[in-house]
Amino acid sequence: MVKKKKKKITIERLRKLNFIAFIFFAVQLGLMALIASSKVKFDITTNYLTFDVATSTLTTSTKTVFALPLVWPILAFLAMSMTAHLIISTIWYRGYKKDLQKGMNRARWVEYSLSASTMIIAISLLSGIYDLSSLIMLFALTSIMNLCGMIMEIHNQTTEKTKWISYLVGCLAGIIPWIVIAIYFVASAQNASAGGAKIPDFVYWIYVTIFIFFNCFALNMFLQYKKIGPWKNYLYGERVYIILSFVAKTALAWQVFTGTLRP
């Protein structure tokens, strides 16, 4: 029996894969925009100090800043990903090619710094985090995590031996939002055990699946820089990034849709 020869991973094939990802993201974005309910909204709040005249003490008060439809962050990260894949496969292709030949991809990390951070916002809202300041910090930490990936790749252009400091800082920044979200999950579970309302089961599935995907991105970079197995070829890791990005965002978008955004 003659074995089929595996197709070689080339930059041109990656260009086509990016364009295919663009098409699939565009289709999902269009479907989600047409059929997803915009009735599910969360009141984004802020806390501030007030003075209680009766007790002569400082107290905190909460006010609603605005109502955020859950579908907005979902549409936003789909749109960001769609746009990034289109730009990479068209007007930025030369820059993309030059970066890959050097063993890096700046465009990937810029897009992730926005889209992955927006994904965290969606997960945070479903976990019960509505404080504006907290959401900004979670967004920023996730963004910093991804920008550290870009710094890792740029920095190691000038080193003979791989330097891991940016990778480690990125992992530290990236794990904090998940710890914060987990604290809310635990509090919700404790409340449910006491007879109160609990977080819907689909949210737990989102937490587990997206947490695993986020860690797969870090693992992919680790394998690239350790040059383990097929990851000796940087282009192999780039293909894994594209597939991981598509699967993770698709999983989150449609899990949220089936859980809360159905019309």
Image (cartoon, helix red, strand yellow):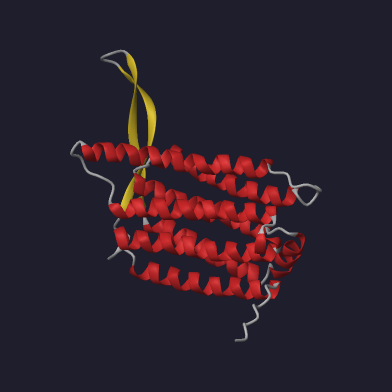
Q: Residue furthest left?
A: 195
Q: Is residue 97 above or below residue 57?
A: below
> In the rendered image, is residue 136 in sight?
no
Q: Quadrant of residue 109?
A: bottom right
Q: Is residue 43 above or below residue 20?
A: above
Q: Quadrant of residue 263?
A: bottom left
Q: Residue furthest bottom?
A: 1
Q: Position of residue 34 (x, y in %)?
A: 36, 70
> In the rendered image, is residue 18 in sight?
yes
Which is more toward the observer, 15 or 69? 15
Quadrant where the N terminus lies? bottom right
Which is more toward the observer, 238 or 150? 238
Residue at x 46%, y 51% (from the top left corner): 211
Disc tally is 0
Relative horizontal placement of residue 57, taking residue 119 as reference (left or right): left
Relative horizontal placement of residue 161, taking residue 76 as reference (left or right): right
Relative horizontal placement of residue 135, taking residue 235 as reference (left or right): left
Q: Position of residue 46 (x, y in %)?
A: 39, 36
Q: Residue furthest front?
A: 1
Q: Position of residue 115 (x, y in %)?
A: 52, 56
Q: Is residue 132 above or below residue 107?
A: above
